[in-house]
Amino acid sequence: MKYEIISNYLLPVIAAAVTGLAGFIGMQLKKIYQKHVDDKTKEAVVRTCVKAVEQLYHDLGGPEKLEKAKDGIQEMLKEKGIAISELEMDMLIESVVSEFNYGFNKAVPAAGGPSTAIRADQDDGTEKTAGDTKSYSEEGGSR
């Protein structure tokens, strides 16, 4: 009698609970994975758009380039069904531009004096040269 109750009632309840828990865990893992994929996609789209704008619209000023990049980013992410906030987009753009400038500054010879090349993040109407920026090294941080 005791074993009949366990096999008829308790085991199906336990199986249903385990199945429900596994389904819940699976959904949570999918959400985490999807967020990771969306974040990587956003970074790739921003990087692509910033590079494209820099090449296609090199004669435009900083604010115009920024608007072109934002338009391209929003359009590409909309096609992929990924939402992005204005703040997130600004932060990602700033990060990519900073990486570009860091790479550019490393290529400028230190002994030759400041370069006359305009930085990509210029948007305040003033001319900034590569020598005007702080350099960064992984060992020592900001110099």
Image (cartoon, grey):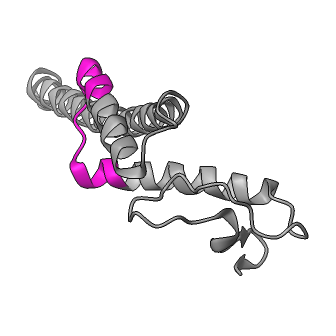
Quadrant location of the C terminus in the rendered image: bottom right
- Foreground residue among 25 and 36: 36
At x 49% / y 38%, what residue is drawn? 59
Magenta stretch in the rendered image: 75-90
Q: Is residue 136 magenta?
A: no
Residue 132 in the image: above or below residue 87: below
At x 36% / y 45%, what residue is drawn? 66
Give the left or right position of residue 6, taking residue 43 as reference. left
Q: What secondary structure characterizes most of the magenta part? A: helix
At x 29% / y 20%, what residue is drawn? 80
- Foreground residue among 114 and 27: 114
Quarter residue 112 falls in: bottom right
- Foreground residue among 82 and 37: 82
Position of residue 140 measured from the top left corner of the image (x, y, whole percent): 76, 79
> Could one spot residue 112 in this view of the protein?
yes
Residue 46 in the image: above or below residue 72: below
